[in-house]
Image (tube, rainbow, N blue to C red):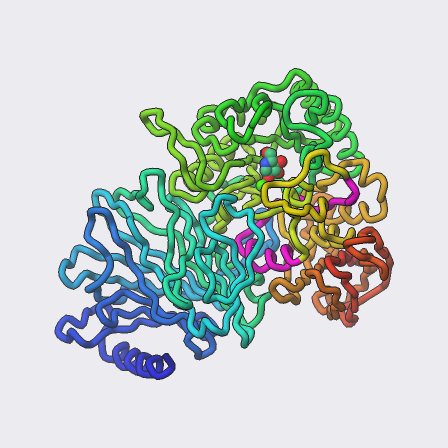
Amino acid sequence: MRLFFSSFTLIALLVVSIIPCGVLAENAPNQHKVLSLASPNNEIVLHFTDEDDLARYQLSFNGKEVIGLSKLGFTFAKALPMYRDFRLSEVSRNRVDSSWEQPWGEQRIIRDHHNELVVKYTDINNAQNIFYVRARAFDEGIGFRYEVPADSSRDITRELTEFNFLNSHQATAYWIPGQGRERYEYLYRTTPLQEVDKAHTPFTVEYTDGTHIAVHEAALVDYAGMSIQRQALGMFSANLAPRADGVLVKKTGSFVTPWRTITIGDEAVDLVNSFMALNLNEPSKIEDTSWINPGKYIGIWWGMHIDKFTWGSGPKHGATTERTMAYMDFAAEHGFDGVLVEGWNVGWDGNWIANSELFSFTESYPDFDLKRVHEHSLSTGVKLIGHHETSGGISNYEAQMEDGFALYQKMGVEQIKTGYVAFGQNLKNRDEQGVMRYEFTDSQDVVNHFIHNVKTAAQYQLSINTHESVKDTGLRRTHPNWISRESARGQEYNSGWAPPNPPEHLPIMAFTRMLSGPMDFTPGIFDFDYEREHGGGPEWGDKPYTRPLSTLARQLAQYVVIYSPIQMAADLPENYLAKPEPFQFIKDVPTDWETSIALQGSVADYVVFARKEKAHRHYSGNDWYLGALTNEDERVINVPLNFLDKGQRYEAQIYRDGDKADWRTNPYDMVIEKKTVTQDDTMTIRLAAAGGVAVRFKQL
Ligand code: NOJ
Ligand code: CA
């Protein structure tokens, strides 16, 4: 490969200099062309080529080829293939260095600094058969998308995009399966890159020399979600979730694909400290975003997961008027913005996962009085957070969606949590003939359903927090009312109905799932000693634990580590009242940030974040927060506090694992202490196994 690369580069230089832009080398059949695009700092260089008359790209980082020649193109059911016999030409170049402001986010101001190249590939045998590739190179990686001119219709049967990881024997991958039964709710696999089969994205790869690469996509709109499938050692190709009719993607007229993105850096945190995916998405379609509110909430929720309450009606029904009002009182007293209520509406009795068509989005159970709850919401100032569980019944939901939205809007609701509990290939969507069709979570129609849902919600000034949704691809920029989502294995798995998340789960998610966007993980479990009447799923085995594999300090750390503009305090109110001191951190921590920095970390081992609060509502904008957590290994972290503002003194309010903290036997041992610090100090903190630390730096 090395030999090949140097001759490739040499020819590239020659060809680029002898062939004028935009002219095909028609008379020189053996001479191929290479067009290159460098990142602003020149560290990343993307090359397009038509060598061997194939449309391909290649990527180098710090002078070293990391993604070898990788195919581009499509095959279609009827239209001419975009497969081989293609020639390359340059269309345009552009440079951008601008900034834009997020209405909410892990960082307020986002810099968009990139170089752009648009290339055209033309079929040697048919000059009408063309496609364009628009590529953007940022300092943190590259993105490219296909732009295909109009044709009457195209049914995509394959997207040929490849990701050819070189030196794959030196690489480890962190991944979950693509298009699986549990959607994206899997434990992460850590395997040699060469052993990956079909993986979901963000797909993260770590090389022995420290180079980290993540493959993902941006702006997934009217297209199928991409998994990547191994073709040969180190060589992967795009694998699109098929539609119910077996076609991958149906298109009429011209179309663009989502961006295929490759983030790359010298260390793991480089992947996190990137806003490339947001920059590749379109600006907000919502002009006035003042009604979209980040914040914190509690809910009638964990009680159902630990079997204390039920979603359905009966003696243990969780969603009663009285309980909701009491939760609102608690929320008002402790500064929460909302109360989520699940199971208030008809449809939960019996096997609600199978009976998706029985869900009503407007009719409540007799013991839940929506009007009284609304009145109580007005008197307490605490919002009701709505819930739309569909159990994957897309057509049932779409038929009632606007009625459901209208009702919630009337009841002062600002946010709705939606849910699509169904196996990942089983979302139920009736076709025009009324025949039930079964869809993947990330098939084209379901992708479109999720976008239709957030767009329609915007008309009612409602924000959506989707559970079991398609993966995030940065669309929160375009639709800022898509306020959060789950799309991974969250805290719910720690409630005892399935094997809990192992301690390494979060230090892997920080470098995989979290690269895609905010997650409604639902942190903050304070009581680990609950008993379940019913427990365990089919793979539960010897059922070793029915609780978070975590120390208490780690539950606090999650509020800083796992970014979401809405954060739940997931436990029962009484469990917070029993531990008022650690609860103070949850009350203090904001969910909207001026800036965020992943300071240190190593995939599957640990991660350390610092975030500065954004000035809004009762937050001054002066305080910093730090969160760190580790896997099953205890470790000591040294954190230079040079991120703190210069010349300022801070009271560091530290919530750390106590010396006797042990996630198996003594998870509650925690020390809360205060120190005065400045940016010249370094903090040395011991994290217990499965532990963590949370710090508020209150400016003095
Ligand atoms: C799965 C969601 O992730 C969870 O939060 C919710 O409670 C249940 N579905 C029921 O809707
Ligand atoms: Ca879920």
The reply to whether the magenta stretch includes residue 523 is yes
Name the residue: 61% across, 19% down. Answer: 364
Percent position of residue 613, x then y: 69, 53
Image height check: is 604 above or below 421? below
- In the image, the segment drawn in magenta is 504-530
- Please say whether residue 97 is visible from this viewpoint: no
Judge by depth and name the residue closer to the eye, 494 or 51.
494
Percent position of residue 577, x then y: 84, 39
Judge by depth and name the residue closer to the eye, 122 or 553.
553
Left/right placement of residue 672 relative to residue 10 reads right
Name the residue: 32% across, 27% down. Answer: 432
Image height check: is 387 above or below 515? above
Percent position of residue 342, x then y: 64, 30
Percent position of residue 554, x then y: 74, 54
The reply to whether the magenta stretch includes residue 40 is no
Q: Quadrant of the N terminus?
A: bottom left
- Please say whether residue 396 is visible from this viewpoint: yes
Ligand 1 quadrant assignment: top right
